[in-house]
């Protein structure tokens, strides 16, 4: 059983930065693909960035050039560095994982989910 615990959310002004972390327990580095999703009130959950077990990455167009997904396998931790934040980035951010190679943002591929961490960007 994989357990995911997000942290690092908070409130920031537009143009600022935050780094989200996702600690993974019961997790075998190199065997799982992981991703960040987000959901704003009244909107559907959307993929933000994915990191395949093969090392490939994928980003939503809305965050390309601003967000970076990475992992520290020694710490079993996934990160999302978010720069140049915009008010439209305001959402609850979720970490997710599944056993596989693909850097996909198809939420139906993901079996394991964290509880989420709130990010609020003010203008």
Image (cartoon, rainbow, N blue to C red):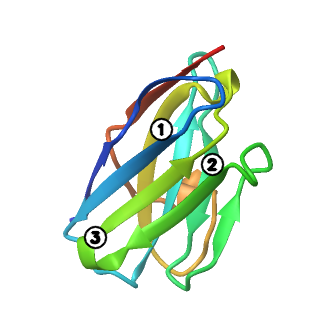
Task: Give the crowd class for mark 1: few <14, some 14-19, many >=20 residues within 10 Å.
Answer: many
In the rendered view, tell whether residue 40 sits above or below residue 103.
Answer: above
C-beta proximity under 8 Å, tags 2 and 1: yes
Q: Compare residues 16 and 46 and report the one nearer the observer.
A: 16
Q: Which mark is residue 48?
A: 2
In the rendered view, tell whether residue 61 sits above or below residue 76.
Answer: above
Residue indicated by mark 3? 76
Residue 27 in sight in this render: no
The image shows residue 29 at horizontal and vertical percentages of: 33, 81
Sequence-first tag of 1 and 3: 3
Quarter holding the N terminus is bottom left
Image quadrant in which you'd find residue 101: bottom right
Element assignment for label 1 = strand
The answer for how far apart the CA atoms under marks 2 and 1 are is: 9 Å
Locate residue 55 relative to residue 112 in the image: left or right.
right
The answer for how far apart the CA atoms under marks 2 and 3 are is: 20 Å
Q: Compare residues 59 and 10 and report the one nearer the observer.
A: 10
Quarter holding the C terminus is top right
Residue 19 in sight in this render: yes
Residue indicated by mark 1? 93
Locate residue 30 relative to residue 109 in the image: left or right.
left
Sequence-first tag of 2 and 3: 2
Image quadrant in which you'd find residue 32: bottom left
Q: Compare residues 57 and 45 and report the one nearer the observer.
A: 57
The answer for how far apart the CA atoms under marks 1 and 3 are is: 18 Å
Q: Compare residues 113 and 56 and report the one nearer the observer.
A: 56
Element assignment for label 3 = loop
The image shows residue 45 at horizontal and vertical percentages of: 59, 36
The image shows residue 52 at horizontal and vertical percentages of: 55, 75
């Amino acid at each position: 059983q994989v357990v995911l615990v997000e942290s690092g959310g908070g409130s920031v002004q537009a143009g600022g930065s935050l780094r989200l972390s996702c600690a993974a327990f019961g997790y075998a580095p190199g065997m799982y693909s992981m991703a960040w999703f987000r959901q704003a009130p009244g909107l559907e959950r959307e993929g933000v960035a994915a990191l395949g077990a093969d090392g490939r990455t994928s980003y939503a167009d809305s965050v390309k050039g601003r967000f970076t997904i990475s992992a520290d396998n020694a710490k079993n931790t996934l990160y999302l560095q978010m720069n140049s934040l915009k008010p439209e980035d305001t959402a609850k951010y979720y970490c997710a994982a599944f056993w596989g190679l693909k850097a996909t943002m198809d939420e139906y591929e993901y079996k394991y989910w964290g509880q989420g961490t709130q990010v609020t960007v003010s203008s």
